[in-house]
Image (tube, grey):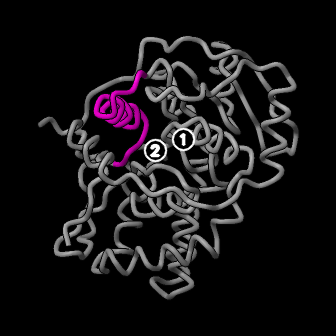
Amino acid sequence: MLAGEAAAEAARKSALPADESPLPADAVELLAAAEEAGEPAFPVAGDDRAAAFFDLDNTVMQGAAIFHFGRGLYKRKFFERRELTRFAWQQAWFRLAGVEDPEHMQDARDSALSIVKGHRVSELMSIGEEIYDEYMADRIWPGTRALAQAHLDAGQKVWLVTAAPVETATIIARRLGLTGALGTVAESVDGVYTGRLVGEPLHGPAKAEAVRALAAAEGLDLERCAAYSDSHNDIPMLSLVGHPYAINPDTKLRKHARSLDWRLRDYRTGRKAAKVGIPAAAGVGALAGGTAAAVALHRRRR
């Protein structure tokens, strides 16, 4: 079995049970507004060959999930204030600079991994549940939550696809009642983190590769699927599907979305959802390659 196929199979097996949490009233209103604007009916109810893939940071959640997680660990004295300050600066650099210098990214990655090294996976999962309630639950964008719920109501599966740690992504997906999550995998041996990654982070073209593998395993038609992201780094994933959405987009993604008549929604200003255009057919597709093991969602060996 190819590594990409293994990733998809692991993700399928990890699909989460649906949540009972109600959809916020303002999210329902946003969907109603879209219907009144005359947008084509989407998603299509009963289309079981369609699914939706959502980026996490600044798409589903305000800010970076890994930073919120770091705040929770700092509160529990996992590390010192100077490390939190350094970690916060590294996260801000990625968001503000709009570039990803490999050396800078490696430094940030090593910093995050050093925090969890030597801790048990089960311990971090338990703490992660608490941190979600403390720092993340109130930062979910109601509008994006409504879009995900629309796919669920249509009988489709909804996946988070993120560079955040897969454990954190899995907790968020379960709390939102989504199908499951693909995320970056930190290595563990006998249930204890080693401070190393399995491959590379789930980022950029690697996201598209993981989505393609999961779609193949699930029997999905990517032309009928949707993807949502705020970042130009996710253009490969967005280009892979027939229904790409730019959510709270950065400058480069906004420009790209306008040029291709992709739909755009910005929930940062409180304005009603803005439609830029009907999704174009998926273009040349995403770049493939790299090691799928780096982006696989693997259950930890305990």
Left or right for 82, reference 185: right
Residue at the location (34% across, 37% down)?
A: 210
* Magenta stretch, residue numbers: 201-221
Amino acid type assigned to the residue bearing label 2 in the image: Val
Q: Mark 1 points at which residue?
A: 54
Quadrant position of residue 132: bottom right
Look at the picture and state if 78 lies above or below 18: below
Quarter of the image with the C terminus in it: bottom left
Q: Mark 2 points at which residue?
A: 161
Q: Where is residue 157 in the image (x, y as percent from the top left)?
A: 48, 40
Judged from this view, the residue extending furthest toward the front is 46
Quadrant position of residue 108: bottom left
Q: Where is residue 286 in the image (x, y as percent from the top left)?
A: 40, 22
Judged from this view, the residue extending furthest toward the bottom is 77
Quadrant position of residue 109: bottom left
Find numbered disc 1 in the image and state the secondary structure of the residue it sits on.
strand
Q: Is residue 202 magenta?
A: yes
Look at the picture and state if 12 lies above or below 193: above
Q: Nearer the viewer, residue 187 or 132?
A: 132
Query: What type of secondary structure mainly makes up the magenta span?
Result: helix
**Is the residue under label 1 in contact with that under label 2 (CB below 8 Å)?**
yes
Quarter of the image with the N terminus in it: top left
Q: Does the magenta stretch include residue 206?
A: yes
Judged from this view, the residue extending furthest toward the left is 1
Find numbered disc 2 in the image and state the secondary structure of the residue it sits on.
strand
Residue at the location (41% across, 17% down)?
A: 285
